[in-house]
Structure formats: structure tokens, C-alpha cells
Image (cartoon, rainbow, N blue to C red):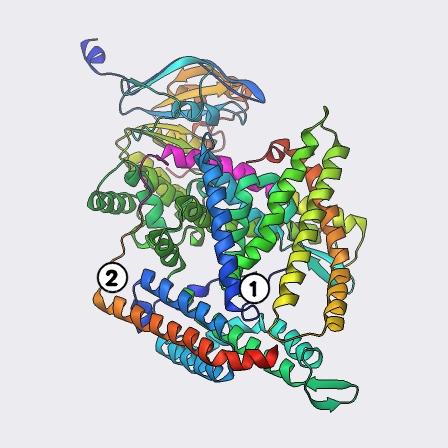
Amino acid sequence: MHIPDGILPGPVTAAGYAATAVVTWYSVRKINQKENPRQDIPKASLLTAAFFVASWIHIPVPPTSVHLVLNGLLGAVLGYFAFPAILIGLFFQAVMFQHGGLTTLGVNAVIMGLPAIIAHYIFRIRRFGNQESRRKTGIFGFLSGAVAIGISVAMFVLILLTNIPADLDIGTERAALYTLAIAHLPLIAIEGVITLLLAVFLQRVRPRILDGV
Amino acid sequence: MKLGIVDEYSDLGSLLHRWEPRCKLIGLMVLIFAFSFVRDLRMLLAMVVVTITIYIISKLPVSFILRRLRYPSFFLLVVVLILPFVSGQTIVMSIGPLDLRQEGLIAVLLVVTRFLSILTIGLILFGTAPFLTTIKAMRALGLPAILADMVLLSLRYLHEIGSDLQKMQTSMSLRGYKKHRFSTRALNVAAWLGGSILVRSYERSEWVYKAMILRGYGYAPTTRGEFQTNSRDVITLGVFLLIAIGFITGDILYGRGVAALLQ
Amino acid sequence: MLSEELIKPTLTVSGLWLSYPDRPDVVQDVSLKVMPGERVGLIGPNGAGKTTFFLGLCGVLKPSAGEIVVLGKPVLNGHFRPEVALVFQNPDDQLFCPSVWDDVAFGPQNMGLSKDEVEVRVKEALSVVGAVELADRPSHHLSEGEKRMVSIAGVLAMRPRLLIYDEPSANLDIRSRRRVIHLLQESKETLLIASHDLELILEVCNRVVLVDSGHIITDGDPCKIMSDDRLMEAHGQEKPHSLVPHRIPHHEL
């Protein structure tokens, strides 16, 4: 879901950085408004690293395997720290593994990070109504995971197809859009399921994590 | 997975190694942004020449960049194989049922060259100074303290958490788990692994926080680093900024021709 | 005695009760007095409350009842008191800075010391633990023994008067363990050491406090307490080898 360097034209990458700067500034402001922001920094940092590592877990999907993105759960668990966490994760990926991109850091952060924030609000909805049940956690877990990755895929495909430095005729473009979208459907389903399983696991083992940072 | 030791050659002492970190960060980042603006084939050539020259000045071994470009080049392969056959109207050659299109070929050239040049400059930026120094430079340039702290803490524990994952996976395979088959069990196991990592990290973070406040975290204003520039640093920065402006201007002047072609 | 009245205790704990949100009364009504220069060993089974007690002493955990006074001033929750230092059981929890130098400098920097003074403190602390050449290394490139030494340096750099060690010899090889024991024996600070390594306690401490289930069971001379078989076994301990009377002589005279 990361757009590498070299594909997107300058103005788009610059716009990406600008958007990321704004959202980051807003997130940092919200964090500083908390009662004890310092207490949450180690939590958010270690969870950032943990999510980064967790994305190395491969799910075998014949013929290959996919690795998890988990931006939905990240949003559910980290709240306002989610956007900086994703930005940092993408930064590490770009610098350490040359995966993703440096010029596209801004665009990629928006693609992965904004849906995470949306997922945070979706997951919060489960608090309405009285009891905390495993089923509720599971359902909202699935929703956060699937919706987050769904929006990311949509943004990724749209930004990519509208900015490739060559023109595709309408027919090819539409075909590409449909193929890419359909190819990602299994991924969306798996992310949803894994997020469900993870949310239920966390509720059993350490429910405090789900209360957010 | 070996964790990103991009700065293994950070002590070579070239001009780029000795360039003050803040100036280097600004200079090289502006340059790679300028690269992403390039659309003209003539500018492409200039981009390649500039990139190679800077690489030579950096004294980084060729093996370094070849090794680092291996993995991301797979993406390039996809672009190279698909774009020329789907993009554009002007058909240059036909290979059986597939038509090679001019616009697609130009697009491929553009993407590949920009990609390789940007990645190379990126490697030079992060490879010619200890990673920690570059982060401190970012902090000095205004990166919010929260982000800087998070980068350093996440980096520090990335190794521990990564090795936790490896240990758990080893213990799984020692107990006979084979992970090639897709099944509900595979999904469950993946979730338990991921969940364990998250819980362990969460609990460890509570100890780290205690350790931090016990040694006064929050009592001193976070310093912005002690970098000092000399005139050589600033002049080098000026040179790079000029080159970057050159590329952007060049694109505005010449790019129009190619842009019209691609439209 | 007159001299006792003039010397103030380093640590006075009165009626301390400590709880966690999910675990009440981990430490129950503990009272303790430690004089300057004493080396107190805290022994007891896992879950006795030793670590919790330490967190209370440092002001990290707020007591549900009781008072703690260190060096004449009460310990307040959340206040930074560099005179009291805690070395954690797991050095990884404590080594959170990118490099060794940064980690050892962390405390002095937060104390507001000048750059030069910080430099002095870091060098001093690293040389006491014998880790000067590790200064530029990233924390995760250290062996267990090195991590332990660096985490000790990190607190020594604050020049504390009361040093608390939680399982200092855990996970160490023989050589590293010997270095830690040597370091503890050379310490001039007041020490409070929790350890399952009873031989270490015998070699270092001049006083032992046995704890179990949140209470102090007994407090006194290390040899006397640790040679009491019944007492030790009743609280999940064993007599250390050095105190076992040898029926089959196997030491050369």
C-alpha cells in the first residue's frame, strides 16, 4: 500500500507532505492537551515498534503470503498517537528497507494514517450501549480493520492511477481500477478477520490496551 | 530480518560525511524533491550525472547501493513490464498481440530513473552519518519533541521486540507448527503471535516509563542538539539548493514539451 | 547512644501499605529504618512484594497508607529525587536511550547539570563500572553483563546516596556476577539489595530482611537468619551453601 519514489509527480508529493504536516501538528496538539502526555509516549512508542514488527508476520494466502498492515487496530489502540506512529513506521521502512519512499512519505502517511484515525472512531462506537461483550469487540474489530484497509486501498489505487506519468485510455484505466480493487478484496477480508481476532485476544488478555493510549 | 544498518559506512570521512547534518538534511531532501519534479528526458540525463557524481564523492562502496537496491527493484520490474504495453497511443512496435507504446516507454524511463536517483540520494543521506545523528538534526530543525522521542524509543526497542517475535516463531516451529497452509488455525496463530507482541510491548513500556521518570524524565527541557555550521557547510548547502532549483526551472522550461506529448 | 541520635537514618519507612489497582495490599504495614552505610539484603519468595516495595520507596507508586522519609525529606509520589536510585531487574527496561553515553547522561541532564558536568559524571560512572569503552555503542549491541553494568552506571551518574538493586545478578554469567559483587562491595552508598542469589547477599550485606506475602518476617544478622533452616524453608528459601555444615568435607584446608 505504499507508493514508492519516482512515480508521483513533484506537486503531489509536496501536497502529501503538507497534508501530513497538518495532521501531525493537529495530533501533537491533541496529545499535548492530555493530562499526562509523557506517560503515554513510551506506551505509544513501544506499540509503534510492536505494530511494525507485527506487520512482519506472514499469513499464507496461496499462492503467496501477505503481511499484515493493521492500521485499523493501530488506530483503535493508539488514538491520536496513531498518525505519528504510522508516520514513524513508514519512515523506518523507507530508510531501513528502502520500502515505500522518502518523497512519498507524506502521501503514504495520509493513505495509511487517515483511515487509522477513522478506525479509532469506529472502534469507539462499541462503547455505546451497556455491556462489553466479546462479540461486540469482535464486530467492531472487524469493521475497524476492514474499513481502514479498504479506505487505504481505495486511496492508494486512486492516487496511483491518476498520477502515473503517462496516459491510460479510459478503458484501460477502468480495467486497472477494477482489477486492483478486486485483487485487494481478500486482503481486506483477512485484515478484518485478523483485527477481529486480535481485538478479542487483547480483550481477554489485557483489556486495558483497548481503552486506548 | 536484519534491522536497517544503513549507517554501516558512516565513518568514511568523505565531503558528504563531514557535511554538517542539518545542512545535509535540507540540501539532500530538497534535491530529491526536485528530482520528483523532473519530466524531461534531457533533465533525466542531468539527474543521473548529478546522482552518480554525488555517490562518488560520498565514497560509499558500490556494493552498498547494489545490495540496497535489490529488494525495491522488484517493484520496478512490474512497472517496466506493464507500462509500455498499456500506456499511451503512439505504437512503436508490435510483439505478437502486444503493442509497445512510446508514451509508456518514456514513462518507464522517467519512473525508473527518478526512482533510482531518489533512492540513491536517500541512501547517501542516511548512510553518511550515524542514524542517531540524523534524527538529532531533524530535532534541531524543528521536529516536535514528541516525535523525536517516539522515533528514538521505537528504534531502541525494535530489536528487542523483533527478537521476541523470532523466539516465539522458533518455539512454534520446534513444536511442529508449519505455516504454509491457509486455514482458520493459521489465522488464529497469527493473531496470537501479534497479540502477544502487543501485550508484551505494552507491559514493557510501563517499566520503561517508570525507569524514565526515576531518572527525571520531564524535568529538563529537551535540548535541540548542539550542531554548528561553518561557512563550508553553508556553501555546500547553497550549491545543492542551486542544483535543485536548476532541476525545477529546467522542468518548467523544457517539461512543457514532454508534458504536452504525454497529455 | 549519643552517636546514634546524631546520625540520621538514610531511610525511614513507617506503616507502609502499597497496592495496585488489580492487586490490593501487596505490601502490608511495613516499617523499616536503614542507617547510612548499611547494606541491607532483602530476601523472600517471588510475589513477596520486594519490587513493589522498591517502587514505593522511589516515589513511583503512591502508598495507600504510611510514610517514607529518605535523607530527612518525605518521598512524594512523582517527584524526582536523584538521591534515591533504583536499578531494575531487567536492564532492557532501563536502557531506553540509543547509545550507552546517552543513557548514562540521561539522569544528569535531567538534573540540570551543565554539559561539562554531565560529561564528567558520565565518564566517572562508566569507569566505576568498567564500561568506558562501551560509550558509543547502541544499547542493544551489549551483552547481558554489559547491559547490567551500563544500567548501574546510569544511576551512579546521578551520585545517589541510597542505591536500590532489584536482583542484580539475575541472568549474569559467572564473570559478570563476580564484577557486580565486587562493585557492590566497593560501594560507599547505602545499599538495599533484593536477590535470590543468597551467596551474593552473604558476601555483600551486613543486614538481612526476610519478607513474605507483603510483611517483614524478620530483620537482622545475615548469618543468623539464613542459617535458620526452618525459618528459611517456611518462607520459600534455602540455606545458602556457605552456611551448610559439611558432613562430608570437600573443601581443602
Q: Which residue is mark 1?
A: A99
Residue pointed to by mark 2: B229
Between C46 and B233, the one nearer to me in the picture: B233
Q: Chain of mark 2?
A: B
Q: Quadrant of the C terminus of chain A?
A: top right
Judge from the rendering whether residue C103 lies leftward or rightward of residue A142; answer left or right.
left
* Residue A101 vertical placement versus B138 (above, below): below
**Do the residues at pointers 1 and 2 share their chain?**
no
Q: Nearer the viewer, residue A6 or A141?
A: A6
Q: Quadrant of residue A128?
A: top right
Magenta segment = B197-223
The prevailing secondary structure element of the residues shown in magenta is: helix
- Gap in angstroms between the C-alphas marked 1 and 2: 32 Å
**Relative to C209, residue A20 above or below:** below
B203 is within the stretch colored magenta: yes
Q: Nearer the viewer, residue B122 or A23?
A: A23
Residue A98 position within the rendered picture, expressed as x and y whole percent measured from the top left: 53, 66
Q: Is residue A84 left or right of residue A150?
A: left
The chain identifier of the residue carrying mark 1 reads: A
Of the 4 image quadrants, the one containing the N terminus of chain A is bottom right
Foreground: disc 1 or disc 2: 2
Q: Is residue C203 left or right of residue C113?
A: right
Local secondary structure at mark 2: loop
Instruction: Please say if the residues under marks 1 and 2 sit with CB atoms less than 8 Å apart.
Output: no
Give residue C156's position: percent from left, percent from top: 30, 38
What's the residue type where badge 1 is placed? Answer: His
Circle 2 crowding by C-alpha within 10 Å: few under 14, some 14–19, many from 20: few
Q: Horizontal placement of A61 versus C154: left or right?
A: right
